[in-house]
Image: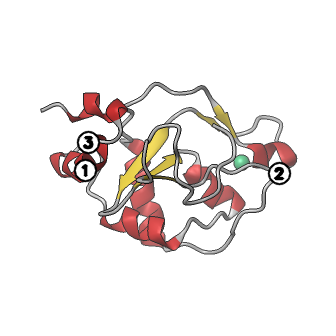
């Protein structure tokens, strides 16, 4: 996936409006910077370490922001992160942590709040939180079998 504006609905996966993009940055597009709560960053790291991967990766994401600078080898990752809230499902590259730590990216406040409230990845509570979105997003069905 290439650049998608924060909180834009992703129709590639979802027939409705319930999947929202977060942190699909590109070096050609401005992004918001600023501090984030430490508690959020700690929790985000825990989510990323155990990130549920219901779909095959669309290939490696390379950090375009690093390429712009002096680093010869840009930071790479191929995994994604799903964070449910009560109304939407956020879809971010796991590279979001790198964006925050190295490039001072500041995610939308509603995403920060969703991470603070989300059950841990792959727990029954987590799958229960994702279930409302699965009906509209058939790809999720494999991960939701009981
Ligand atoms: Zn980078």
**In the picture provided, is 105 more to the left or to the right than 145?**
right
Q: Quadrant where the N terminus lies?
A: top right
Estimate the x, y position of residue 72 in percent, counting from the top left.
83, 36
Does dot 1 land on a helix, a strand or a loop? helix
Estimate the x, y position of residue 77 in percent, counting from the top left.
59, 35
Estimate the x, y position of residue 57 in percent, counting from the top left.
51, 27
**In the picture provided, is 140 more to the left or to the right than 56?**
left
Q: Which mark is residue 28?
A: 2
Q: Is residue 129 or residue 119 the one in the foreground?
A: 129
Quadrant in which residue 119 is drawn: bottom left
Q: Residues within 10 Å of mark 2 (few under 14, many from 20)?
A: few
Alpha carbon distance from label 3 to label 2 = 35 Å
Report which residue position mark 3 lands on.
122
Q: Which mark is residue 81?
A: none
Q: Residue at x 48, y 40 (%)?
A: 80
Mark sitting earlier along the chain (1/3): 3
Does dot 3 land on a helix, a strand or a loop? loop
Q: Quadrant where the C terminus lies?
A: top left
Report which residue position mark 1 lands on.
132
């Amino acid at each position: 996936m290439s650049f998608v504006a924060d909180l834009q609905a992703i129709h590639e996966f979802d027939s409705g409006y319930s999947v929202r993009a977060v942190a699909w940055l590109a070096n050609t597009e401005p992004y918001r910077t600023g501090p984030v709560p430490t508690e959020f960053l700690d929790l985000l790291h825990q989510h990323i370490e155990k990130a549920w991967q219901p779909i095959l990766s669309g290939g490696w994401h390379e950090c375009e922001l690093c390429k712009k600078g002096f680093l010869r080898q840009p930071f790479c990752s191929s995994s994604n992160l799903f964070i449910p809230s009560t109304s939407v499902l956020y879809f971010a590259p796991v590279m979001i942590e790198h964006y925050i730590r190295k490039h001072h990216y500041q995610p939308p406040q509603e995403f920060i709040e969703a991470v603070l409230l989300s059950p841990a990845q792959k727990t029954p509570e987590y799958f229960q939180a994702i279930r409302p979105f699965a009906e509209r997003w058939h790809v999720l069905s494999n991960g939701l079998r009981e």
